[in-house]
Amino acid sequence: GENVEQHPSTLSVQEGDSAVIKCTYSDSASNYFPWYKQELGKRPQLIIDIRSNVGEKKDQRIAVTLNKTAKHFSLHITETQPEDSAVYFCAATRYSSASKIIFGSGTRLSIRP
Amino acid sequence: EAGVAQSPRYKIIEKRQSVAFWCNPISGHATLYWYQQILGQGPKLLIQFQNNGVVDDSQLPKDRFSAERLKGVDSTLKIQPAKLEDSAVYLCASSLRGSTGELFFGEGSRLTVL
């Protein structure tokens, strides 16, 4: 069945440095890749997404890149800040009303002061 | 606008007992999801509704779990009988139209099975 693998499971970076989280997916028909952020004790919230017709998307300090050939996509956070500390989940799905969204296992990002 | 509402927030039961969780999605959202999130893991889809029809329930343990969305609005997830491994947070989410946009999650219902 469909599967999304996410690495690393934990990541600690110095404040101000960059963080990169990587995901691979198995379903070659997947064409929509959202990223969710879940702060401690709170609900997951969408932070950025990308569709397969583009290779990169940027929103301020956050960017996502997609390599459809290799079936992997990555989240890049630059100039990390304490409020970036959270668990990040990647997901993959087919962009339709009847497709299920498969989540990765999550990356716990800690920002060191 | 009001968000996704879930209740109860917390529930502690003994194994073999039953429990029910309720979810009211954002008004107008056709798609409703129930996810199970075990501590330290990503959300695992249990069941997905499009209006009041089931789109996917391939990972729902149907011998003990059931879910319904009778009028295409709110939904109930039931576990009977519960097992220790059912301890998790049960997240309800809704979206305007399937996976074509953002999922809005509720705060979750944390289940502890003793």
Image: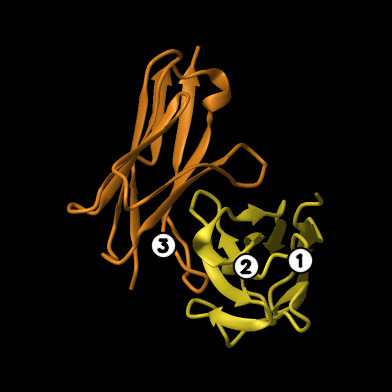
Chain letter of disc 2 in the image: B
The hue in which chain A appears in the rendered picture of the protein: orange
In the picture, the disc for residue B23 is: 1
**Quick check: B57 above or below A16?**
below
Say which element carries label 1.
strand
- The crowd level at tag 2 (other Cα within 10 Å; few <14, some 14-19, many 20+) is many
Q: Quadrant of residue B14?
A: bottom right
Q: Are marks 2 and 1 on the same chain?
A: yes
Residue type of the residue flagged with mark 1 = Cys
Q: Residue at x 47, y 68 (%)?
A: A96
Looking at the rendered structure, the kind of residue marked 2 is Trp
Q: Earlier in the sequence, mark 2 or mark 1?
A: 1
Q: CA distance from mark 3 to mark 2?
A: 16 Å
* SS at mark 3 in the image: loop
Q: Is residue B98 above or below residue A19?
A: below
Residue under disc 3 on the same chain as residue under disc 1: no
What's the mark number on residue A93?
Answer: 3
Q: Residue A49 location in percent, x, y?
A: 45, 45
The shade of chain B is yellow
**Figure quadrant of the C terminus of chain B:** bottom right
The subunit letter for the residue under badge 3 reads A
Structural distance between the alpha carbons of marks 2 and 1: 9 Å
Rendered position, B51 above or below A104: below
Q: Where does label 2 land, which residue?
A: B34
Label 3 Cα crowd, 10 Å radius (few <14 / some 14-19 / many 20+): many
Task: Please say if the residues under marks 2 and 1 sit with CB atoms less than 8 Å apart.
Answer: yes
Taking the spot 69% from the left edge, 74% from the top edge, the residue there is B15
Residue placed furthest toward the front: A53
- Neighbour tally class for label 1: few under 14, some 14-19, many 20 plus, Cα within 10 Å: many
